[in-house]
Amino acid sequence: MLTGSSTVAPLIGEIAKQFEAQHPGVRVDVQSGGSSRGVADTRRGLADIGMVSRDLKTGEQDLTAFTIARDGICVIVHRDNPVTSLTDDQIVAIYTDRINNWKEVGGSDAPITVVNKAEGRSTLELFVSHFDLDNAQIKADAVIGDNEQGIKTVAGNPNAISYVSVGTAEYDATHDVAIKLLPLAGIAASIENVRAGTFPLSRPLNLVVTSEPTGIVEEFIAFARSRDVNEIILEQYFVPLSQ
């Protein structure tokens, strides 16, 4: 069983299907719930492998991480929002309620709906770290869990702002979901820029275990890190480790 990051879970779900096809009789159970759950379940023996969409923290060095791909995190607004970019300072001001109307950043005269991630989500941890924020400083109008929930919230509210996986957002935006990806520090939010290493906010997608993997766990991790799954990783709009 694998539990953890809702960003990693759909990718692992697809990798698991291919792995199961090559290993008759093996069933891979994949459950999301956030990176913190992946760490906790792995430590407690409730999961064979944890899914963690960030680097391991100082207090998590009892775990071993195996990176399978990379992802970026971007800010999104509704497709009809006239705002095309925000500075880092403006993003911080919006999330701390010092700016609360779109007209203050060149948009329409409308209140900003701030959408934040729930505690335990690695996307939240990376966002606050990048912008040197504390979650307690964020004044959210809505709190969401996974990326798709954030995207649906913004797509359904012309005045909303959120931050989600670049891969998920780029996929949805190109499939007529009503969102727009904003650049960060002048760099366009795209899988290509994450791959090139130029996008300023990116992260590893990891599988974590408590000890040196053996048996079927070792085989699964090796498969998830192999070139055999590059196509699956690209289809999920993430960046493979090897080309």
Image: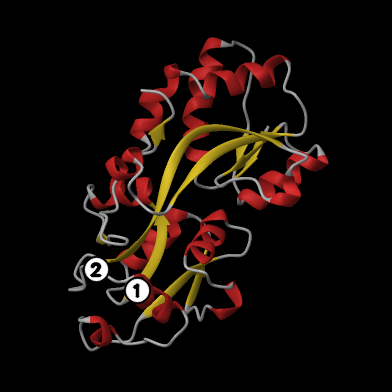
Q: Residue drawn 62% across and 64% down?
A: 119
**Earlier residue among tags 2 and 1:** 2
Colouring used for the render? secondary structure
Q: Quadrant of residue 55?
A: top right
- Work out whether residue 8 can be spotted: no
Q: Nearer the viewer, residue 86 or 223?
A: 86
Residue 143 at x, y percent in the picture = 52, 70
Q: Is residue 120 left or right of residue 177?
A: right
Q: Where 195 sits versus 214, above or below?
A: below
Residue 110 at x, y percent in the picture = 27, 87
Q: What is the secondary structure assignment of the residue under circle 2?
A: loop
Q: Where 104 sits versus 118, above or below?
A: below
Q: Nearer the viewer, residue 213 or 202?
A: 202
Residue denoted by label 1: 160
Q: Nearer the viewer, mark 2 or mark 1?
A: 2
Q: Quadrant of residue 233?
A: top left
Residue denoted by label 2: 85
